[in-house]
Amino acid sequence: QVQLVESGGGLVQAGGSLRLSCAASGRTFSRYAMGWFRQAPGKEREFVAAISWNGGSTNYADSVKGRFTISRDNAKKTVYLQMGVLRPEDTAVYYCAAENHGSAYASPDEYDYWGQGTQVTVSS
């Protein structure tokens, strides 16, 4: 069982940066791949980024490539999403998720545990 708690969301102007964190509980965090997803009002949840169990593989949505970076610290049981050059269309609730096969999948169906989400609002 893994419990996930996101933090770091907030209000930022377009062009600005934010870093999201996702803290995990449980002894087996290092076995899980971790992903970030987001959901804007009236839209489906969409993939943002994922990282494999050891950080050796990452995967990004085309819409965030070159602007967002996912990383993890297994000793701290935390995954991060560094977001830069933010745009109003990045406004959403951001969720982290854990996947127990260790691979950086993009499909939310592959993920077994989810956090409660943190709101990111980008003003124009």
Image (tube, grey):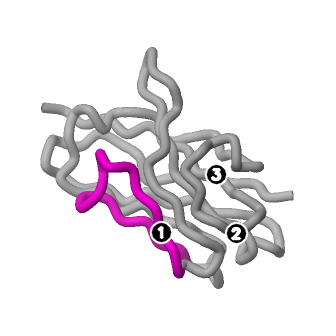
- Closest to the camera, between mark 3 and mark 2, is 2
Crowd tier of the residue under label 1, counting other residues whose Cα lies within 10 Å: few below 14, some 14–19, many 20 or above: some
Label 2, on which residue? 102
Residue 92 rendering spot, x and y as whole percentages: 40, 33
Separation of residues labelled 2 and 1 (CA atoms): 11 Å
Picture quadrant where residue 3 is located: bottom right
Is 78 part of what is drawn in magenta? no
Relative to 44, does residue 113 appear above or below in the rendering? Answer: below
Query: Amino acid under label 3?
Result: Ala
**Residue depicted at x 55% and y 50%:** 106
Separation of residues labelled 1 and 3 (CA atoms): 14 Å
Label 3, on which residue? 97
Query: Amino acid under label 2?
Result: Gly
Relative to 35, does residue 26 appear above or below in the rendering? Answer: below
- Comes first in the chain, label 2 or label 1: 1
Segment tinted magenta in the rendering: 56-72
